Amino acid sequence: MSKLIIAGGTGFLGNELLEYYRNKYAEIVVLTRGKSHQKENISYVNWDAKSNGDWAAKLNNASALINLTGKSVNCRFSEKNKEIILNSRVDSTLALANAINTVENPPKVWLNASTAALSHPNKKENGEDFMLYVGQEWENAFYSVENKQTRKIALRISLVFGKDGGALIPLKKITQFGLGGKQGNGKQMVSWVHSNDFVSITHFLIENKDVDGCIVVAAPDPKSNSELMAIIRKTLNVPFGLPSYTWMLKIGGSIIGTEPDLILNSMHVYPKKLLDNGFSFSYATIDTALKNLLT
């Protein structure tokens, strides 16, 4: 009997995966901090994402494990939030790695979320980049425990654009309010992936047994922030967009409780390994992706 485990499967990406996989596996187990319950062929199983427990037995005889666990980075990077962002990723990854080694028939493949910042580290003037540090610690945890019977892949995920969630939603809203101009100097690069392609990539990697290691999850069409906002305006038929300067983003971020660096930092990555192994994007260009998502 085929079984898929999704850890942290109740957010935007988790819901996208469930929609895609619900008819492809006889059983799906979602590890969640919420209450345990059953919904058709999906079992929601409580775990604390930190320590071993009864949930570990669910890993036995699993065909695949996908781990998306981690506090959202859409917040202010206070010291407290930084600690939670880091620990939620490292602790859950270590818990899964250790639990895999306690079951007789461990998952055949494990896809663990990571950040595309590792494939194009942002160079800041003060030499610090919190998300780069998080990514390094995340992947160190992933590979620190040897899981001999499980193929392991680190998903270096870029910005995911979806109809019902992800990084495109706030950009759409501010554009509709006439604030869809460049952000900061507009030169920072934006790597992105359509949510449908994100899901397809996970399926591709599960099925292709010769692929492992670190995989950049991004479409092969990165754009500058200025270019991206111009295409969003064109797609939405919004004739103009006021720019958001760096000082404005810092004030606005403080008001709405998010971190300006998430917009101002550059991320320029390319999915070479996916393309070399034969993956075909349904939305390879930003124009086709936005036409699908915004119209």
Image (tube, helix red, strand yellow):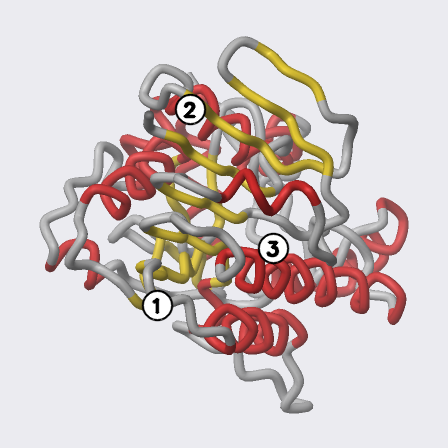
Give residue 47's position: percent from left, percent from top. 72, 42
Is residue 85 placed above or below 205 in the rendered structure?
Answer: below
| Mark 2 residue crowding within 10 angstroms, few (<14) / some (14–19) / many (20+) | some
Q: Identify which residue, 147 or 57, lies in the foreground.
A: 57
Residue 113 seen: yes
Q: How many labels does the image show?
A: 3
Q: Which residue is drawn at 11% across and 59% down?
A: 276
Q: Tell me the quarter of the image containing the N terminus.
A: top left
The CA span between labels 3 and 1 is 46 Å
Residue tagged 1: 148
Residue 227 seen: no
Q: Identify which residue, 144 or 256, lies in the foreground.
A: 144
Residue type at mark 3?
A: Gln
Residue tagged 2: 293
Is residue 243 placed above or below 239 in the rendered structure?
Answer: below
The CA span between labels 3 and 2 is 21 Å
Say left or right for 248 vs 189. Answer: right
Residue tagged 3: 183
Q: Residue at x 49, y 65 (%)?
A: 188
| Mark 3 residue crowding within 10 angstroms, few (<14) / some (14–19) / many (20+) | many
Which of label 3 and label 1 is nearer to you? 1
Sequence-first tag of 2 and 1: 1
